[in-house]
Image (cartoon, rainbow, N blue to C red):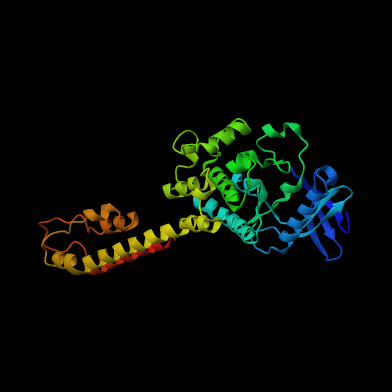
Amino acid sequence: MGRYEIAMRVGAGAMGEVYAADDPHLGRRVALKLLHGPRTKGGDDLHARLLREGQALARLSDPHVVPVYDMGTRGDRVFVAMELVDGVTLRRWAQARRRPWQELVRVMIGAGRGLAAAHRAGLVHRDFKPDNVLVDHDDRARVMDFGLARGLADDQRGAANDLAISLTRSGAVMGTPSYMSPEQHAGHRVDARSDQFSFCVALFELLYGVRPYLGPSVVALARQKHHRQVRDPRRGPLATQGRDVPRWLHRAIVRGLHPEPERRWPSMDALLEELARCDQAPRRWHWLAIAGVSLVIGGLSGGMVGDLLQGSRAPDCSWFEQGIVSAAAAARLTSTSACSGDPGHRRPTVTRAEAHQAGGDALDSLKSRD
């Protein structure tokens, strides 16, 4: 195919067939996608637009985007040469095993960075979904197929009712119905906020195991999206897989699913900044807990231990149970009799060294969870 030497067929999808091919000019192996449909189906204007977008992608360099090396034609069909990534689709990666929500969010943040980079370059994906993201062996997400569906003609008359097939007729609805924004359903102009909507649908699906909308047809899906009929994560199968998803994260996703583009996040970067809380929030709590442990150590080293040495009474340790220190620290202090002294006992129930040791154990426990 052109200068490329086909080595093997590696896959196929709604948009075309993918081959591993060798580029003898540059001495590298590439992924060669041969797009479905004849070049002349939609006219030369569509072909020219597809090539322009391919040229724009070829200039886009971002670690979270699969780079496009070349585009051309073979007979009446268009082909795209891109980097051959050793990995799997985001969907297959997520289905391989049960993963904590933090891990899912971190990988999706990588995919979101790829989208944000394309938006800054003036490109809109229009068909973002887990099948258009590759995850390599380092768990790095890389977005592919930017805008390629836009220039393709869809001659499958029954595709309008297939929620997993891209609808790509130029001038009409373009995208995959389950992930499309309301404005895409309506055939209106799309921009970066449409990609944000699709991104949030995909993130919802990864976290809860199902998509946020359950329409049996394209029309039903469009209606649910327009009326903000997002599934309740506290009911049905969502309650089991997504029970650990924090409320702030669910609210962030729902905002990105708003039917009015101006009510969504201002940009992908703004949404990604919010999602980054999955790493920041636990650390803030740990520092608060460490501060609490410091108070514990200070209190035990000062007045409490002083009272104990004077044989007055055991300290009131009920505040340990209020979450100021970790369970491990509370157990350590309990084992040293810090909270079980006899008020009438005339000798100390805990030493200064034991108090410091307990605090040190608590700090080690907290740090190990970062």
Mark count: 0
Q: Is residue 334 left or right of residue 40?
A: left
Placement of the C terminus among the 4 image quadrants: bottom left
Task: Give coordinates of residue 144: x percent, y percent.
Answer: 69, 53
Q: Quadrant of residue 298?
A: bottom left
Asked whether the viewer can see residue 83, the reply is: no
Instruction: Give the camera-side residue of 33 and 198.
Output: 198
Asked whether the viewer can see residue 312, the reply is: yes
Task: Give coordinates of residue 150: x percent, y percent.
Answer: 72, 47
Task: Give coordinates of residue 259: x percent, y percent.
Answer: 53, 42
Instruction: Give the camera-side residue of 135 and 307.
Output: 135
Q: Is residue 170 left or right of residue 279?
A: right
Q: Is residue 86 left or right of residue 252?
A: right
Instruction: Give the camera-side residue of 290 and 122.
Output: 122
Q: Is residue 353 above or below residue 226?
A: below
**Residue drawn at 47 percent across, 58 percent down:** 279
**Residue drawn at 34 percent across, 56 percent down:** 328
